[in-house]
Image: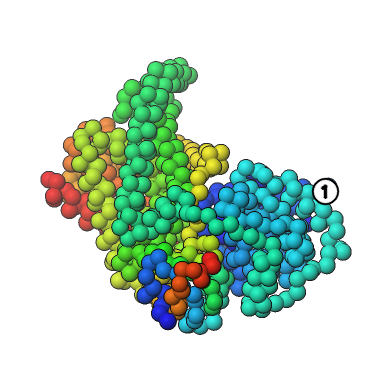
Amino acid sequence: MISLTKLSVGENAVIVEIKGGLGFKKRLESLNLRKGKSLRKISSAPFHGPVVIEIGGCKIAIGQGMASKILVEVAHENTFNG
Amino acid sequence: MKILLMGNPNVGKSVVFSRLTGVHVVSSNYPGTTVGYTKGKINVGTEEADMMDVPGTYSLTPSCKAEEVARDMFFDEKPDLVVNVLDSTNLERNLFLTLQILESGIPTVIVLNMWDAAKRKGVHINLEKLTKSLGVPVIPATAVTGEGINETVSKINEVSKGMDSYKPKITSMNGDERWAFIGNILDDVQRIEHRHPTILERLEDASVHPVFGFVIAAVVLYITLEVVVGLSNMMITYIMDPFYYNYYGPFITNLISGWFPNSIVQSILVGTGYQDATSFGILTTGVYVEFAVVLPYILFFYFMLGVLEDFGYLPRLAVLIDSLMHKIGLHGYSVIPIILGFGCNFPAVMSTRILEGKREKFIAATLIAISVPCMAQTAVIIGLLGPYGLQYIAIVYGTLFLIFIFVGMLLNRLIKGESPEVFLEIPPYRIPHLNTLLKKTWFRVKAFVIEAVPFVFLGVLAINLLYIFGIMNVIIAALSPVLSNLFGLPNDAIGALVMGLLRKDLATAMLAPLNLGINQLVVASTVLAVSFPCIATLVILLKEIGIKDTLKTLALMMGMALVVGTILHLILG
């Protein structure tokens, strides 16, 4: 289990835990970021900039602090279902 | 009857709204274009209903300002009917809000927008089944082309007739139940073909790449400058100048001189004639500066801005430079107001509303006012300094850029707090729709003309009156020590500085007849840009950040103008 910031660019993963308060979770949830969802890391902006992921067909940019609270399990290519 | 138009950010609500009501609203391919709301009318049966374009929201439990506005409108306005716009390519996330709306029991019509994009992406949606599971009408639509709009209108009519007998199918749920429900619906109604990423999709990912991202940003900047400056200058040389000097100028000068020979009216309206740059008549120099010099730049700038907006580039630029922006107390998204500022500071300051915190809003608004020259000003600076060589234009913009960085870092230190982190959906790249793009450009250019013309007239009139009543001499006496000692400018430049309070472009143009040296022109252009916001920007500053913060901004501007003007004078000699 690693945080989204540690995930390598191009890798697929599944969200296993979101740390932080209820408000934070709700905010992520409304954008469809929740436990069990598969995602792919697209890029990590320079100078500790935001992480960009693809999840459920859309792309979302997340600041480093927030991204470090999202814990994921690296998934193998063939189990990735978008 | 009251109808609310709701949906996630960036699903095309504003386009649907324009189509349904005929009221034009600016739409772009990035979330948050609509922060306030717009009202329009739509005919439902024999009745005229109010329709409101609500800012985009992902849920009715808000996490930012725009979402709060949306929630409050939904609960306070008590709509009779909701038109819920969805992005067909992203049904799963969009349905979360849909369920929350349906749970409230208000009759709803669902518009599946971007139906064409969904088809291209290989997303197949079974409309019949979806209608059945949600218990409300579902209409596929492509709002930019108008497809599905008539059906939407007729469904609104249908639903409004059967309002009393409407029985909601969806009952109240919690978050997890909602997602489970959505999962079930999607298994049933949606099938996604696997497609290989298109060139546009590859370009999307490259735009936020740590290396290619900056290469792309540089290319975009270069092309934008080439198009705006190149095409504007061509339009000025081949269309505007010939028309002004051969037809308009002689015509208006003869006309006015014939009507009011040798009077004050003549000197205010046409000055000493159309050929003379020093004349400063409203209808000669005033019209020439605004329409022949500035208007082409405004036109091509807004066209290019529209292309970048509709293509979906700006949010990616925001992500790319987010961490750099944090160093000056902003987050990446504030790049959008700043870019708008290069067009006109007025809408730029207004658009700082898309930023989350008060602190960030103040920093962004101040930086725009102090260091972002508007396109009108840019046009005149290029016209004025260009003949002496590019390096002089570079000095002015380089200085402004340094001020931008310096003031940003200073404010970031001085003001407590931190800028919030980026958390935003970045839209897919879309090929801009030409009609929408031209319409948007037209509306922005029109807004410029409507805003500029009265101030130009007022400005020229005010300057003339100040001279006639001798007030100008008092101002000159008061300010001449600063001007001549610190900035090395002649007293005549005062007129330009005073005009700067009303319109920056005209003010900069007033430097032309003073026979200044190129170094003096550089100092004066920079001081004019920094010293004070034009009146329109001042008004919007007061409205957006309040009187206290506006006074701080003004103090900072005048202080910086003194320092920067002096330093430039010392360096350039």
How are the colours assigned in the image? rainbow
Residue B197 seen in the current view: yes
Residue B379 seen in the current view: no
Q: Going by the picture, which residue comes out furthest to the front?
A: A78
Q: Residue at x 31, y 28 (%)?
A: B277
The image quadrant where one finds the C terminus of chain B is: top left
Per the image, the residue denoted by label 1 is B45
Q: Position of residue B568 (x, y in %)?
A: 18, 50
Q: Amino acid at mark 1?
A: Gly
Q: Pointer 1 indicates a residue of which chain?
A: B
Quadrant of residue B106 in the image? Answer: bottom right
Q: Residue at x 63, y 68 (%)?
A: B96
Instruction: Give the camera-side residue of B139 and B285.
Output: B139
Number of disc labels: 1
Classify mark 1: residues with Cα within 10 Å, few (<14), some (14-19) or many (20+).
some
In the displayed structure, does residue B233 sit left or right of residue B391? right
The image quadrant where one finds the N terminus of chain B is: bottom right
Q: Compared to A52, does B390 lie above or below?
A: above
Q: Position of residue B227 (x, y in %)?
A: 37, 37
Q: Residue at x 31, y 49 (%)?
A: B218
Q: Position of residue B162 (x, y in %)?
A: 85, 59
Q: Residue at x 20, y 41 (%)?
A: B391
In the displayed structure, does residue B159 sit left or right of residue B21? right
Quadrant of residue B184 in the image? Answer: bottom right
Secondary structure found at label 1: loop
Instruction: Give the camera-side residue of B364 and B4.
Output: B4
Q: Compared to B301, does B172 lie above or below?
A: below
Q: Compared to B387, does A19 lie above or below?
A: below
Q: Going by the picture, which residue comes out furthest to the right?
A: B165
Q: Compared to B313, does B440 lie above or below?
A: above
